[in-house]
Image (spheres, grey):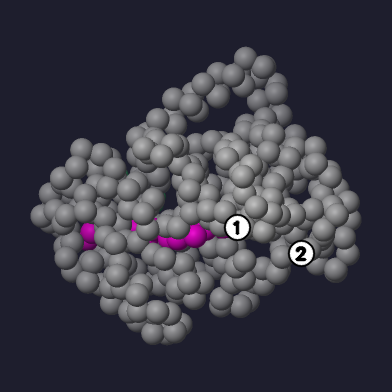
Amino acid sequence: MPTATASVQASSAQLRTDLRNVAIVAHVDHGKTTLVDAMLRQSGAFAARAELVDRVMDSGELEREKGITILAKNTAVRRQTPDGVVTINVVDTPGHADFGGEVERALSMVDGVVLLVDASEGPLPQTRFVLRKTLAAGLPVMLVVNKVDRPDARIAEVVEEAHDLLLDLATEVGADESVLDLPVVYASARAGKASLSQPDDGGMPDSENLDPLFDTILRHVPPPTGDPKAPLRALVTNLDASSFLGRIALCRIHAGQMRKGQTVAWCREDGSTQRVRITELLITEALERIPAEEAHAGDLVAIAGIPDITIGDTLADAENPEPLPRITVDEPAISMT
Ligand code: GDP
């Protein structure tokens, strides 16, 4: 994890230029899995993952079964840039209208959204629900038109439809029309290729790889902000479980740092605060969760050791227990700090 925070003043928020948190919104079958897979392959993370599995296997099959490696709910893609390695956390969103607030929770973890649309089918009604919430939350959107290689692709029309949809929704939620300055990337996820120029219908993007997609994400999705020297504040946005670690809380760290073994204040819904210990801290590497010693403002982490922790709770500095606004399920707009 990056540690280039030493010179930051206590009061100043810092841009995590080494990090992007992005959600992919797509209708089922439009190619989300294929695209994330291709991104992983091209980031070289599969090699790292193979090593990881080897390491874990070395420590015994039993430990592996106990849940040392746990499949993450998000994917971390590492990207070499001239300024160093950037981690792109890709958060999944439910591809359907959802009444449990899962869409809001996914969106509360990210700073931008990739709208992935099939070049033949175009944006479909279920995408509308998630996209409306995206605009209500004020998150920037970029468009990926996938499957441009389909013989029945109608690329220009699909871009037009996406524009119309965004204009419609921006009007509905009162969002700024600047969302229509929409970066568009054309892709064949299956071929692992992308371009900024529009290919012919049924043709191929003019680049040999997904670089134009990576570049657009890095340019268009802002790095997370947060003061790594401020008191810790991390919001629990989702839950998971492992037979070995018990309940796992997925959090976004909004300020400060978190360390394995640290004692923190657990701010609960009833307003009470309790001191608890983070027995395990995990970050995502490609598709898996791996143990980490520390994490910083902007990071998405998974923690274990607090059996009754739940969504909306805050983990805060033990000496400065200030809860973040709880995520409310029924509100159209989400609380972001
Ligand atoms: P998801 O449901 O959004 O995760 O979609 P998948 O990634 O599982 O893809 C759905 C289907 O579309 C699969 O059969 C893929 O092989 C196919 N597919 C994905 N990307 C492309 C593409 O760029 N071109 C074509 N022709 N097919 C694709």
When asked about the image quadrant of residue 246, the answer is top right
In x, y percent, where is residue 88? 46, 46
Residue at image position (40%, 44%) is 36
**110 or 241, which is in the foreground?**
110
Report the residue marked by disc 1.
13
Dot 2 or dot 1, earlier in sequence: 1
| Front one among 212 and 246 | 212
Q: Is residue 236 visible?
A: no
Q: Quadrant of the C terminus?
A: bottom right
Mark linked to residue 31: none
Question: Circle 2 — which element?
Answer: loop
Which image quadrant for residue 153?
A: bottom left
Q: Could you say which is closer to the camera, residue 127 or residue 258?
A: 258
Three-letter amino acid code of the residue under disc 1: Ala
Image location (x, y in percent) of residue 223: 48, 54
Residue ID for mark 2? 323
Q: Could you tell me which residue is drawn at 60 percent across and 58 percent down?
A: 13
The N terminus - image quarter: top right
Element marked by disc 1: loop
Find out whether residue 112 is within the magenta segment: yes
Contact check, label 2 and label 1, Cβ < 8 Å: no
The stretch drawn in magenta includes residue 131: no
Read off the magenta span. 109-120
Between label 2 and label 1, give the one nearer the viewer: 1
Crowding at dot 2, Cα within 10 Å, few <14 / some 14-19 / many 20+, comes out as: many
The three-letter code of the residue at mark 2 reads Pro
Visible in this render: residue 119? yes
x and y percentages locating residue 305 in the rendered image: 80, 43
